[in-house]
Image: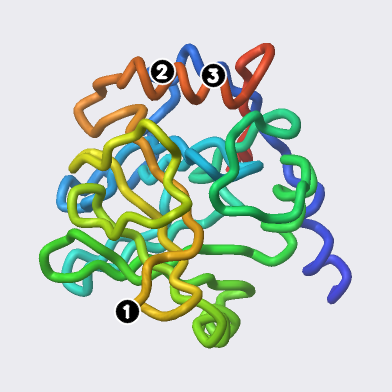
Amino acid sequence: MAAAFFFTPLLRQRDKLDLGAIASWGLQGPMQDQSCPILGVWLFKGLVPGIAMDTSHCTTWDAHTRTLDCSFHSKSAIFGTDHNIDEETSPGPPVSSDKAMRLFSLLRYDVRMQFNERLTEARVTSVMFGSDLVGKLQEYAFIERLERGDVATRGPWMPKGLKLTKDMWVRNNYAQGLDQPPGTGYLLLPVLTPRGGVNEGNLAKAKAKAGPGQQALRFRY
């Protein structure tokens, strides 16, 4: 029984997605609360191997506590079909999408975002096996913040030629503490908005990141 608990997630089925048809499959999840400040499909710029996040498939949005829980072993996380083409600003081990999906599924990896009252930034905590203990211990090494683009602290890791705007979010890693500039991070650029609008420029970036075929993967459930 214990072996089945740990290894059954590795066998979960996946669906292949055509990024060009994102308007037909994006934002189709059950979480449609317009009060959620980050409802949409967001391109990860500077992070691999993930391509995007569809927050309509996040598990819960609590408007009272301003807390969003997103499962990265479910349909909310979108990956490429191989290594992704991106300029990394949040360096990590060069793992393939297949290995990352298996690892997130095995760990039951979730991300918790608790927003401030102005809904302009959020504390980010990792949750594994239903516990945020590892995420809290991680804060002794670095602090993770999600910040709206127009109020975000500009770090030395920022991609050149991009201007921070209100419609994007910045995931900053403060390795030296919140009183110092962030050391690394990445951007979340809007691809599909709650009203169904497609940002063609950011969609083009997503297609370029996916590479030939412009295909993506996500868990079936």
Alpha carbon separation for disc pair 3 and 2:
16 Å
Comes first in the chain, label 3 or label 2: 2
SS at mark 1?
Answer: loop
Q: What residue appears at the point 83 percent right and 61 percent down from the top-left corner?
A: 7
Q: Position of residue 164 (x, y in %)?
A: 26, 42
Residue 11 is labelled as none
145 over 10 or under it: above or below: below
Q: Is residue 201 left or right of residue 33?
A: right
Viewer-nearest of discs 3 and 2: 3
Residue on which disc 1 sits = 179
Residue on which disc 2 sits = 24
Comes first in the chain, label 1 or label 2: 2
Residue on which disc 3 sits = 207
Q: What residue appears at the point 74 percent right and 57 percent down from the top-left corner?
A: 103
In the foreground, 209 or 214: 209
Q: Is residue 93 left or right of residue 191?
A: right
37 over 106 or under it: above or below: above
- Kind of residue sitting beneath label 2: Ser
53 over 110 or under it: above or below: above
Alpha carbon separation for disc pair 1 and 2:
43 Å
Q: Position of residue 183 (x, y in %)?
A: 49, 64
In the foreground, 68 or 90: 90
Q: What residue appears at the point 42 percent right and 36 percent down from the top-left corner?
A: 160
Q: Position of residue 85 (x, y in %)?
A: 65, 29
Viewer-nearest of discs 1 and 2: 1
**Based on the displayed image, in which of its 4 quarters is residue 156 positioned?**
bottom left
- Kind of residue sitting beneath label 1: Asp
Q: Is residue 69 left or right of residue 196?
A: right
Rate crowding at label 3 as few (under 14), some (14 to 19) or many (20 or more) other CA atoms within 10 Å.
many
